[in-house]
Image (tube, grey):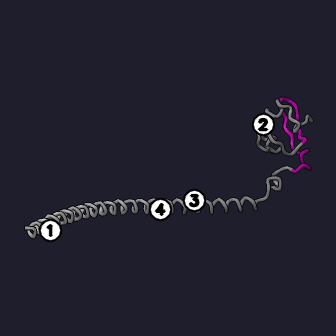
Amino acid sequence: MSREKELLEQVDQLQAALKSEKEISLELSENCSKLEQANQEIGSLKAALIDELEKTKAELAEALEANKILMKTMEDLSTMPDAAEKPSQPSSTNLAALSFTKDGVKYGFNFGKITHKKMPISAAEVAVDEKLQDELIALKSGMLKVL
């Protein structure tokens, strides 16, 4: 009977191995399903990244074009003559030609340019701008002189 016992043990071992093989097959099938899901998620993420990359490329192209325009503008501005070099602006030698009258008092200029409220202003601007005239007179600006 020992031969029967051996055969029964072998049958038990084979059944255990068969169960183990079925479990492995089931686990493998589940893992394949998970892998397929992961691949789909990766594909979706890849598509989203490609979209984002295309948007970023477009934004970069716009920024580069804006930069090119700004650089050209800066170049153009740097080659323009200064306002002091324009013939319409008075030079320090013709300050005597500029004057204005306010409340019966005639004013001339000591300086061709000053900074007022953090902005450069010229004698020519003051000569035609009553608001600037009032402000500078009220401040007793050294730019002005009574004639």
* Disc 4 + disc 1, Cβ < 8 Å: no
Residue name at image x 43 percent, y 60 percent: 49
Location of mark 3 (residue): 63
Q: Nearer the viewer, residue 41 or 144?
A: 41
Q: Earlier in the sequence, mark 4 or mark 1?
A: 1
Q: Which residue is mark 4?
A: 53
Q: Earlier in the sequence, mark 3 or mark 1?
A: 1
x, y percent for residue 42: 37, 61
Residue mark closest to the camera, 1 vs 2: 1
- Residue at the spot 59% in from the left edge and 62% down from the top edge: 64
Q: Nearer the viewer, mark 2 or mark 4?
A: 4
Q: Residues within 10 Å of mark 1 (few under 14, many from 20)?
A: few
Circle 2 crowding by C-alpha within 10 Å: few under 14, some 14–19, many from 20? some
Q: Earlier in the sequence, mark 2 or mark 4?
A: 4
Q: Quadrant of the rendered structure where residue 98 is?
A: top right
Looking at marks 4 and 3 on the same chain, the residue that comes earlier in the sequence is marked by 4
What residue is disc 1 on? 10
The answer to whether 41 is drawn above or below residue 139 in the figure is below
Q: CA distance from mark 2 to mark 4?
A: 54 Å
Q: Quadrant of residue 138?
A: top right
Residue 132 - label: 2
Question: At label 1, which amino acid type do we have?
Answer: Gln
Q: Amino acid at mark 4?
A: Leu
Q: CA distance from mark 4 to mark 3?
A: 15 Å
Under mark 3, the amino acid is Ala
Find the magenta span and give its range.
91-110
Tag shown at residue 32: none
Mark 3–mark 1 Cα distance, whole angstroms, equals 77 Å
Q: Dot 4, crowdedness within 10 Å: few (<14), some or many (≥20)?
A: few
For discs 3 and 1, the disc positioned in front in the rendered view: 1
Label 2, label 3: how many angstroms apart (C-alpha)? Answer: 40 Å
